[in-house]
Structure formats: structure tokens, C-alpha cells
Amino acid sequence: MLSRERVVTALARREPDRVPYCELGIDRSLAQRLMGWGEPTSQAANLEANAYTIEEAKALAAELHLDNISYVLRAPVYTRKLPGKDGRLFYGEGLIRTRADIAMMDLPDPHKDELYAEAEHFARNKGDYAAFFVTRIGIFPTMLSMGTETFSVALYEDRAFVEEVLDIYCDWMVVVAERICQLDFDLFISTDDMAFNTAPFFSPRIFRELVLPRYRKIAPKITIPWAIHSDGNIVPFLDDLISVGVQALHPLEKNAVDPVAIKRQYGDRLCLMGNVDLNLLGAGTPKEVDAEVKRLIRDLAPGGGYIVTSGNSLAAYCLPENVRALSRAVRKYGKYPITL
């Protein structure tokens, strides 16, 4: 099978020729070490922009035997940016603390063709790879922009404030999703973090009152397979997510969820994507990574509907030798029928 066919088959919860290996993102400083692209520096200050040209994305995919390439387009997040190692920026304190602050929110015009020109070029030139469109729908950028404390207090003291910010993001995404799904992407993946390791950030009742109606508004526009990424334990939301058309779940974070239990309960409705431990990729050995991938394929791949990925994305601290070991192990153990 070609890579795209392999991924599409897995997303349909069937068995391809082998388990696909995909990544949502690869930190540029890691990519530079993997590819010999010069001294490691991290990606540009714009945390919402695509990190790679189509040529770079395909070169990385070929090097790591990935079955996908990823294009990133997210609405701006209104926070202070904090510098980390190698100049990498992280989201810090939210800037939308009062209704007056909403005036600073200025999202790119989703009706302008220029917003989609690069995405169209990327998807049109994907070759044999599956093309992932990586974005955010609204709840996580709302939380980031307001800050956790402001968001949490406003949920109970001024719900309309939260909804006003959330609707700015979600109304933008209604237009973006429709335009993107007219291009040749194979997966729409929204990185909507909503959970700690132990439980969601908010109750199922809040999710159903605040988030789910907006997902229902956007869902008809998402006409290609839709995956949700959330770190932590969002198991309490899974039935609701499936009800609006979500077809895949990423990344099944280790020590937050039991992927075997999720496979048992939801494997006929969700393609599972994950979850090679980032701590192992950053501090373990190639032998340990090999054993981890073998175990995941043994437990999650039979019957189809499984895609190996890292437990989030390939972060700057992942060791190149461990990333290569991950890639090798998928090819070593992932051929169907699974006989491990």
C-alpha cells in the first residue's frame, strides 16, 4: 500500500498492510539534528504557523519512514510568550482578562483566499503521503488566551464572557474548516487540550453546555475524517465526541488513560493514535523504545484502527537515535496480520 492508502484504511478502522507511523509535529531543532540542516534552532516565534515547507515535510517523512506530512494553521492565541531552550517559545499568561481586552483579538480573515494558498499548495503536492491538517477549534485557545484562572472563574461568574471569546474562535473555524476540507487533506485534527492526567479541566456538564454545541455547529463543515488531540484523560467526553463525528483519538497519553481499555470499549468507533512515551524518547534507549513500540502494536493494532505516533509530537528533547528506533520498530513489528 502507499502511505496515504495505509493511513486512510487505518482511520476507517480496518487493517492495512502494516500499522501506519505518523506524527502531528516535529520540533525544528530536532529536525535539524535528524537531517543535518545546520545548528539546532527552534521554530519561529509564530506558534500558530506551519513549521515546514512541503519540500522539508516530505524530506523528513522520507527520512523517518512516516506515512504522513502535517500542515499547521491555527488562530492566534493572546498570551505572553515565554522563551525556553534554543529560543523556543511557550505560551504564558493569558492577555484576555476582561471584556475590554477582547478588542485586541484580530484573527486573520477566514474568507480571504490568501489564508489558504500555502495549505492548498501543501495538500496538492503531498505525493503518496497522507496530509494532516492540524488546527485548534476554540476551547483550548480560549483557555490559553484568558488564562486558566480567569477562564475558570468566569465559567461561574461570567459565562457570557467565556462564550464571547469562544465564539470568536469557533465562528472563525466554521469558515476555515469548510475551506480546508475542499482541499486534498486526509485528516482534520484539532488539538483541543481539555484534560489533566487525572480528569478533564471541567465537568461533563460544562463540556455539554459550552463546548459540544459549538462542535455541533462546526461538525457539518468537517467532511474528511476528524481526529481530536487532547493530552490527559478525556475519557468522560468520548461518547459525546463520537456523537458529533470524531473518528480518531490522539495521543492516548501514558499514565493518563489506558489505551487497551479504550480499544476494548471504543475500537469499533474510534481509530486510536499514539502513544510512544515522550520520556522514553527523550531519556531512554533505542532498545527500550523498540520494546515499547512492540507492546503497543501487540495490544492495539489487531483488527486495525491503530496508528503509531509519539505520545504528543516529536519534541526538541527527543533523542535522534530513539526517534529512528521508533520508526524501525513500526516497520519491524507492524506488518498485518499481527502475530506478536
Image: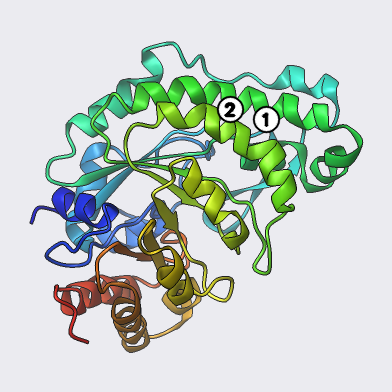
Residue type at the position of mark 1: Leu
Left or right of 146 in this view: 74: left
Name the foreground residue: 223 vs 107. Answer: 223
Coloring basis for residues: rainbow
Q: CA distance from mark 2 to mark 1?
A: 6 Å
- What is the number of the mark on residue 166? 1
Q: Give me the residue at 13% from left, 40% from top.
A: 127
* Relative height, residue 100 to residue 210 (above, below): above
* Relative height, residue 6 to residue 338 (above, below): above
* Relative height, residue 192 to residue 298 (above, below): above
Extreme residue in the right direction = 157
Name the foreground residue: 289 vs 308. Answer: 308
Kindly check if marks 2 and 1 are in contact, taking CB atoms under 8 A apart as contact.
Answer: yes
- What is the number of the mark on residue 170? 2
Residue type at the position of mark 2: Cys
Left or right of 98 in this view: 304: left
- Helix, strand or loop at mark 2: helix
